[in-house]
């Protein structure tokens, strides 16, 4: 809306002229009076046209409106208890800036249900739903709070490459592309270049951007393209320093969303809680015993499965009253080459996952900074040392102990808001079947 007050701001403009611009959310023609709900990113404003109080031109304009027409309206603010926010605008002029085709392929009012595929096919219409827009306002506030925390604790935002000349983590879950006639790959994580930035002396950095996984996954938890906020910090004592940084970052994000997005959270009918810190920590190999006591046998050396995450979530909630917990010291066999192994027990790694309500939100921990150890672990994973020399060679010239983590932005948003399908927390999600819009 041009110079448009939000619904809440109309109270300050009682009796004054305002200019509104937005989409027609709904039209009701009731004989002696007509109502138009005008919607934009600031909310809904009721435009009320009593037959005896407005011109014939305005009445004719209102009668010709269709849902999702884009309009400009000017008029006077009046008090109206039944209107959204308790105020309405009585128009003296209405102009159609862009007429919408009819019928609509998707109803932004949400009156007619649509499945997730239809909603994503017509994402621009879906985004006009106030409840959908609210998701992205909350997501923005979460990021704002997390970034503010990182900057206040000495982190520098950096941008790392999305196109790599080799596979960073092994496996086949990478997208291959042509790079001037040479093979290249979309990154699985901004991990390695964050580490090189630390070796360059930047101290504390974070990256914010997309990563890709070529998993043929058809679950509500996975996407082929996702975004992460990924801090890395140097001169750590051990992986628990990264855990403390992550706790602080998450709490700051949640606090900011609660402060900035009260209206959106009410619309989404959720009441996120600021978690107590420090988060509980579970560690291997004791995790195997805990799971056994919960009736789930996980073979030694195996990674957590979905059932394990569910049972541990229930266990932590009972024992500690927390929805958040860290899992530490994973079996080194299931983790990438760059993770530091526990020197006294190399079968386990200083690798940390953050779990929230049964869902893994992040993975991180302490990195191996000793060149001989990195070379050894590259060989253990069956990777080509030659293909990784661009990464390993700088470690020969002095590398501080360091670590970090990568938090999935869409996953965190969806989990916090109780959204079942992570694709709803991405503007234009990508999965094995979806490359458009």
Image (cartoon, grey):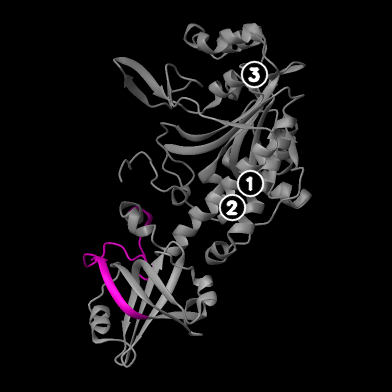
Which badge, 2 or 1, comes first in the chain's sequence?
Answer: 1
User: Would residue 403 be found to the left or right of residue 95 on screen?
Assistant: right
Depth check, front residue: 367 or 206: 206
User: Would residue 230 be found to the left or right of residue 27 on screen?
Assistant: right
Between marks 2 and 1, how big is the CA–CA gap? 9 Å
Between marks 2 and 3, how big is the CA–CA gap? 35 Å
Residue stretch rendered in magenta on the structure: 91-117
* Residue position for label 2: 416
Where residue 361 sits: x, y (%)?
59, 41
Depth check, front residue: 419 or 41: 41
* Residue position for label 1: 356
Considering the numbered disc 3 on the image, is that residue within a helix, a strand or a loop?
loop
Which quadrant of the structure image shows residue 44? Answer: bottom left
Residue 304 visible within the image: no
What label does residue 201 carry, if any? Answer: 3
The residue sitting at 53% across, 45% down in the picture is 411
**Residues at marks 2 and 1 touching, judged by CB atoms closer than 8 Å:** yes
The residue sitting at 46% across, 78% down in the picture is 16
Between marks 1 and 3, how big is the CA–CA gap? 33 Å
The residue sitting at 77% across, 42% down in the picture is 278
Q: Is residue 422 above or below residue 373?
A: below
What main secondary structure does the magenta stretch of the protein show? loop
Where residue 276 sits: x, y (%)?
75, 49
Give the residue at the far front of this rendering: 16
Q: Residues within 10 Å of mark 1 (few under 14, many from 20)?
A: many
């Amino acid at each position: 809306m041009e110079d448009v007050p939000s619904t809440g701001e109309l109270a300050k403009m009682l009796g004054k002229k305002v200019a509104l611009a937005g989409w027609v959310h709904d039209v009701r023609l009731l004989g002696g009076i007509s109502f138009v709900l005008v919607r934009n990113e600031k909310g809904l404003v009721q435009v009320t046209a009593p037959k005896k109080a407005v011109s014939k031109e305005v009445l004719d304009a209102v009668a010709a409106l269709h849902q999702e027409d884009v309009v400009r309206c000017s008029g006077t603010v009046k008090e109206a208890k039944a209107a959204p926010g308790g105020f309405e605008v009585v128009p003296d002029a209405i102009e159609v800036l862009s007429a919408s085709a009819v019928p609509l392929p998707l109803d932004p009012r949400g009156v007619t249900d649509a499945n997730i595929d239809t909603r994503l096919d017509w994402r621009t219409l879906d985004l006009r739903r106030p409840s959908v827009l609210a998701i992205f306002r909350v997501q923005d506030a979460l990021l704002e709070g997390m970034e503010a925390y990182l900057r206040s604790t000495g982190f520098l935002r950096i941008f790392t490459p999305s196109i790599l000349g080799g596979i960073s983590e092994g496996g086949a879950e990478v997208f291959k592309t042509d790079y001037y006639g040479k093979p290249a790959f979309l990154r699985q994580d901004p991990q390695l270049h964050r580490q090189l930035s630390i070796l360059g002396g930047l101290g504390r950095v974070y990256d914010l951007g997309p990563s890709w996984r070529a998993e043929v996954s058809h679950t509500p938890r996975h996407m082929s393209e996702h975004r992460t906020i990924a801090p890395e910090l140097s001169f750590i004592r051990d992986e628990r320093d990264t855990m403390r940084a992550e706790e602080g970052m998450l709490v700051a994000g949640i606090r900011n969303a609660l402060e900035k997005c009260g209206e959106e959270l009410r619309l989404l009918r959720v009441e996120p809680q600021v978690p107590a810190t420090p988060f509980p920590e579970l560690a291997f190999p004791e995790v195997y015993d805990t799971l056994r006591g919960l009736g789930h046998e996980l073979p030694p050396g195996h990674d957590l499965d979905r059932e394990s995450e569910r049972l541990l979530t229930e266990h932590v909630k009972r024992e500690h009253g927390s929805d958040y917990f860290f899992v530490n010291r994973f079996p080194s066999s299931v983790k990438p080459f760059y993770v530091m192994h526990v020197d006294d027990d190399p079968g386990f790694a200083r690798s940390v996952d953050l779990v929230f309500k049964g869902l893994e939100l992040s993975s991180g921990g302490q990195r191996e900074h000793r060149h001989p150890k990195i070379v050894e672990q590259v060989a253990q994973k069956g990777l080509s040392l030659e293909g990784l020399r661009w990464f390993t060679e700088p470690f020969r010239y002095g590398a501080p102990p360091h670590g970090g983590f990568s938090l999935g932005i869409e996953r965190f948003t969806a989990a916090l808001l109780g959204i079942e399908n992570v694709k709803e927390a991405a503007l234009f999600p990508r999965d094995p079947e979806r490359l458009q819009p």
